[in-house]
Image (cartoon, rainbow, N blue to C red):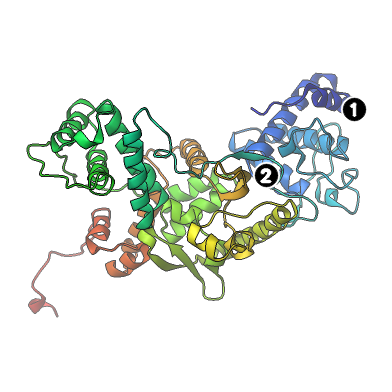
Amino acid sequence: MLTIPNSLIDQFASHINSRGVPAGRIAEYKKWLRYFLDFCDKYPVPSNKGERIRLFCEKLKQKNQSEALQQRAAHAVLLYFEMIPQPDKDMPVSSLSDERATAKQPGTAGGDNAALPVASPSGAVAPLHPQPYYVSEETPRYSTGQSRRSQYNEAGYQETSKSPEWDAALETMAAEIKVRHYSRKTLQTYAKWTRNFQYYLKNKPPAELGTEDVKDYLTFLAVKCKVAASTQNQAFNSLLFFYRNGLKREFGELRNVPRAKKSLYIPTVLSREEIDAIVGQLSYPFNLTVKLLFGCGLRLFECLQIRVGDVNFATGKLLVHGKGKKDRTVPLPESLLQELKAQMQVVAELHEQDLAAGYDGVFLDDSLMKKYPDAPREYMYQWLLPQKYLTVTAEDGKRRRSHLHESDLQEALKYAVRKAKIPKRVKSHTFRHSFATHLLQAGYDIRTIQTLLGHSSLKTTMIYTHCVPVRTIMEPKSPLDFD
């Protein structure tokens, strides 16, 4: 949990005591303040104070807190806002939300606090009537002052080892991957397997490598490590590329290597009720992310890497940058239009705040950054789902805005599935499986689904036919006998 300065807690205890909070509840109110500040640190919250309280209470409701406890938590936060009319230097940056405007008494007209509920020391809180979460008059909902270590790197081949020969070979392989414009994930995966291969051989000189070394390593993975078929095949493809493009030699013929065969994989599919239950347990922005994954049939990174310019409300289409640099368009879900417009407004406000703070822009492909140096700071290239904190790049120390990190979504999704009591193995890709299966169940043509998913081969799409039960009303007969 977020560490709160003791000076702030003591100041808050003194303030709520003066406001008539019973002595027996001061400890509880301090607990709610800690929870609220931790909530603001973990999630990108709106600037509107009333909306922040509403979202906080929703989170408490998800954790099965009673209505009475939610009311006392809301009252504790109200008293906190009343106590802090101006930013306190000892206060955590993420919890401040840059409270630049002087806070007025709850329930008075004007200012941000006009949206706050009226509360009394007894803990009774009137119903909230806040502005929409995307309306902001004063403060950023994302951090423009804090930065995090870059997670947007090419770790794996850049790290030096005890063998300069191996480091040079990996540099050559990385250059070949970049020339082919493969994804950053492909580079990381190939580099990881090559490093593991190096450590398995105990830094054996690359010039002395042979086919038998690969055979021994793949056998080790299959027999000793008992890796999955897909894992072993991924290692094989990585070493094949390394031999041909890093070492500049032929791979050779592999015989008697226990290559794992892929078994028929039946993907996990969720019903609409199960998806709604999971979304109901997710908070912003993860609920919107999952709706896009299911509503548009997107892969995880296709969703996270959506930019503002990819959303076209006029045509109702979303431009998707798929695997292998293959673009496609998918329909925008009509039920998400208002929520997407609200998110666009959030990004627009965040962009203005980032520009005012002097940030260096979002991440773009190197070629595009060289051709259009100002593009990273243009609105159309901003992420639709931005990361909460700025990222400091290791190469040049610039502060850039990355998209929502996949680990944040995966952690939130794991928690939501557990809370929704879904007895299935749910990952981000499960919603793409569900998208295809639901379309197939609705009677859509398999080739239409193939186009929407961006599959190169119809064989890949055909796997979803195993997820749809066959519903026949009669025994099959010859079409010659049809009426």
Q: Is residue 473 left or right of residue 190?
A: left
In the image, residue 365 lies at what x, y percent? 49, 57
What secondary structure is marked by label 2?
A: helix
Give the residue drawn at x 46%, y 59%: 295
Q: Which mark is residue 20?
A: 1
Q: Is residue 365 left or right of residue 248?
A: right
Q: Amino acid at mark 2?
A: Leu
In the image, residue 46 lies at what x, y percent? 71, 49
Query: Could you say which quadrant of the image residue 450 lies in?
Result: bottom left
In the image, residue 145 lies at what x, y percent? 72, 43
Q: Earlier in the sequence, mark 2 or mark 1?
A: 1
What secondary structure is marked by label 1?
A: loop
Evaluate whether residue 483 shows in this view.
Answer: yes
Q: Quadrant of the C terminus?
A: bottom left
Label 2 vs label 1, nearer the camera:
2
Give the residue drawn at x 30%, y 48%: 267
Q: Which residue is mark 2?
A: 55
In the image, residue 203 lies at what x, y percent? 28, 28
Q: Would you place residue 196 above or below residue 371 in this image? A: above
Front residue of 213/1: it is 213
Give the residue drawn at x 28%, y 63%: 456
Give the residue drawn at x 36%, y 37%: 167
Q: Amino acid at mark 1?
A: Gly
The residues bearing labels 2 and 1 have C-alpha atoms spaced at a distance of 26 Å
Q: Which mark is residue 114?
A: none
Front residue of 372/321: it is 372
Few, some or many C-alpha atoms within 10 Å of disc 1 (few <14, some 14-19, many ≥20)? few
Front residue of 425/392: it is 392
Front residue of 3/463: it is 3
Q: Quadrant of the N terminus?
A: top right
The single residue placed furthest to the top in the displayed view is: 24
Evaluate whether residue 270 shows in this view.
Answer: no
